[in-house]
Amino acid sequence: MTVVASEPSGSQPEVRAAAGAVRGSREAGVAVFRGIPFAEPPVGSLRFAAPRPMRGWDGVRAAVSYGPPPPQGGHFGMDALAQDAEGDDWLTVNVWSPDPGAGAGLPVMVWIQGGAYTIGMSGLPEYDGGCLARDGGVVVVTFNYRVGLEGFGQIEGAPANRGLLDQVAALEWVRDNIRAFGGDPDRVTVFGQSAGAGSVATLLAMERAAGLFRRAVAQSVPGTFFSPELAADIATSCAAELGLRPTVADLSTVAPARLSAAGDSVGAKMAEWTDRWGQVAHRSIPFSPVVDGDALLVTPWRALADGAGRDVELLVGHTRDEQRLFTAIEGLLGQVTQEQAATALQVFGPGGQDGVRRYLDGFPDAGPEELYELVHSDWLFRMPSLHLAQAQADAGGRAHLYELTWSAPGMGGAFGACHGLDVPLVFGNLDRGQPAVLIGEEPSPEAAALSTRMRAAWTAFADHGDPGWPAYDTEQRLVQLFDTRPAVTPYPEETSRRIWQDHTFPVLPLIGP
């Protein structure tokens, strides 16, 4: 895995952006521009501040290498990648354009990567936008945003949700600059997966993001949104790892790598605080968007139900086996006990003991591992995604729902249709990046055909708002199943839907003294 640009080939395209001219590369017929700053580096006096517009530059700036990633947590080796990178231009965009001319007017797709709001960088191979741009006739934009304590820690004296504010700033850059790269600023689709999908949902609810995109794609939306009190208590524990308080004064001079390590340390032992932090401590989720009453007034489900996203066309969905990847990471594949399943049902099922009964009644033949995976999948990704579509439809907006049911052939087929499988399929990068291991060493014709179908649906949606199947409604509940043989059917997870139908995915509170 690498975060450096590939060797350019052919002519070097130049574009004049608002802040100055940039020179990129041409790769397989697509003009590529990497590492363009969209905001000042958030370091020094700007540490923990809202993003500031980038000052202009003279001459032509080389745009052939990804910018340095923001500080990262230690999962999947991301911390090492961040520490090995040079510079502090954490906030940069990358652009792939099949026709970098001001009059091209192509649809624009702006990607927000996931990573549990703790890791994530746009320079990973799986997020290369070349295939999507070339085959789909769209301009693809990816960017970095602050994660972990830098982006989502509740720090006294700093605005909350700085990572989300970075995303808004990147979208403002797209609005102001993308025409010069061949894009149409009035046809912007924001799309993301996991924490990126949670970010997309949040942007739908944020007043300051209104008008910055016309369409939205949310792939596996997590249901976790923190109260300020919960976020502040977690940040206090993170700062205490360094013997400090969670304030700008105390933390602004701490080396970014040390701050990330403190967040990792708390994340690794969150089970010690289950009586204070509740469900997120059981799942070791230290960071999420904060419903702070300023940048974010209410949860996305509440906002969409009130009509906030009515004018934005929505494509949303999830994979069938969302939890399977995490079960494997935890070393529990084939090892889940009756006790572990019972605890999961009690903690994550809606309504406590009533939720336990509903799962046992609804899935009478399910063993411990299936019940464990069902309730985790439903709580964290499947039902939040479904409810987002329902909220949009109920408010008179348009939403298209999908489920990825194709089982990943890689790693002996043990992962099923797991979390993250959609990423290589949507980008067409079946042979690079960490998620490609799910596809297998030699991508099959079946995988290639499925990827082609998904990319066609995503780019058609970005172009004209119709991915190729009917909009979701609460009578027929039609969804697109992506599999070897695609089909449009009523939503297949009907038992889970009924179990969760009255749940509202409220703001998660601080529950202990």
Image (cartoon, rainbow, N blue to C red):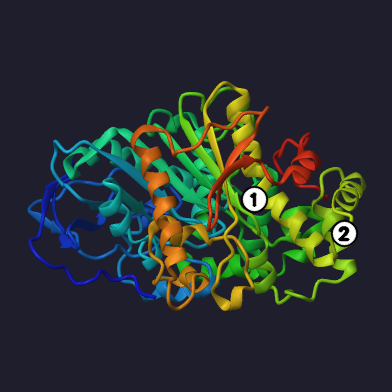
| Disc sitting over residue 381 in the figure | 1
The residue drawn where x is 60% and y is 54% is 287
Residue 355 located left or right of residue 461: right
Is residue 512 in sight in this rendering? yes
The residue drawn where x is 71% and y is 77% is 331
Residue 495, compared with residue 340, is above or below; it is: above
Q: Residues within 10 Å of mark 2 (few under 14, many from 20)?
A: few
The residue drawn where x is 46% and y is 70% is 436
Is residue 71 in sight in this rendering? no
Which residue occupies the foreground of this view, 261 or 358? 358
Which residue occupies the foreground of this view, 508 or 375? 375
Residue 450: x %, y % from top left: 46, 57
Residue 146: x %, y % from top left: 45, 55
Residue 222: x %, y % from top left: 62, 49
Which badge, 1 or 2, is on the more N-terminal residue?
2
The residue drawn where x is 26% and y is 46% is 137
Instruction: Locate residue 107: give its quadrant.
Output: top left
| Type of the residue with mark 1 | Phe
In what quadrant of the picture does the N terminus appear?
A: bottom left
Which residue occupies the foreground of this view, 423 or 417? 417
Label 1 secondary element: helix
Instruction: Locate residue 183: give its quadrant.
Output: top left
Please give the residue where the numbered disc 2 appears in the rendered image. Answer: 365
| Disc sitting over residue 401 in the figure | none
Which residue occupies the foreground of this view, 300 or 38? 300
